Amino acid sequence: MMLLLVWAGGAAVAQDSVTRVSYFADPYGNNASFWTIVYRGKPYSILKIKSPEKAGEADMLLDAATLAEFEARVAELRRTPNQLKADGFKVLWSTTFGEGTVKTLLGRLNGIKVKLIQVTQHKANQAETEHQVSIDECYSSYSSALSKLKKARAAGPK
């Protein structure tokens, strides 16, 4: 009986998985990817962003509700006119889940207006990391990547 319990416990661990599903990049060299993760039988999504001028990357864990809100808020960001008159940022939306915080931002840098997704991650005993990706010119790539993620989530764990 004990052997059966050990084997069953091992089978549950074997079902845990991490898979990169899709990817998009902006014209400034920032990269983002969506991943699916199954941990202890529960599905999650991960958004990873890497800015080339910064070390490391930042990850945001997204459960089903946070992913739905994220999708709606990025669509809202796309529709919102960027009326910033001076260089700086305006946060439209922010939420925290686990070790990460995701924000949608209107920005203006050296007179160039951008719409950004930003992920800030703070892991225990590590320095905070913050990375952004612009969606202005790559919204269709972002939408395609998000669609692939939603299909992968609907298909369930492999």
Image (spheres, grey):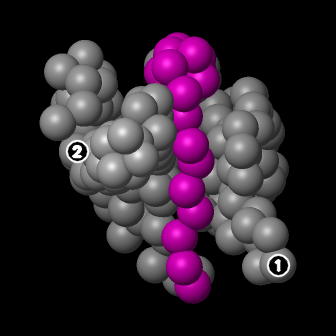
Badge 1 amino acid: Asn
Q: Nearer the viewer, residue 76 or 58?
A: 58
Front disc: 1 or 2: 1
Which circle marks residue 21 in the picture?
2
Q: Does residue 82 appear in this view?
A: yes
Residue at the image point whose x is 23% and y is 46% from the top = 22
Q: Nearer the viewer, residue 76 or 107?
A: 76
State the image coordinates of residue 43 (x, y, percent, origin top left): 42, 31
Q: Is residue 129 left or right of 16 when viewed as pictured?
A: right
In the picture, which quadrant includes the N terminus? Answer: top left
Quadrant in which residue 92 is drawn: top right
Residue at the image point whose x is 57% and y is 84% from the top = 55
Q: Nearer the viewer, residue 133 or 83?
A: 133
Q: How many angstroms separate mark 1 from mark 2 (CA)?
A: 29 Å
In the picture, which quadrant includes the C terminus? Answer: top left
State the image coordinates of residue 136 (x, y, percent, origin top left): 42, 40
Residue at the image point whose x is 79% and y is 53% from the top = 88
Q: Name which of mark 1 and mark 2 comes first in the sequence.
A: 2
Which circle marks residue 142 in the picture?
none
Badge 2 amino acid: Val
**Magenta stretch contains residue 73:** yes
Q: Nearer the viewer, residue 157 or 112?
A: 157
Q: Does residue 36 appear in this view?
A: no
Residue underneath mark 1: 125
Q: Which residues are magenta?
A: 55-74
- Secondary structure type for disc 1: loop
Dot 2 surroundings within 10 Å: few (below 14), some, or many (20 or more)? Answer: many
- Secondary structure type for disc 2: strand
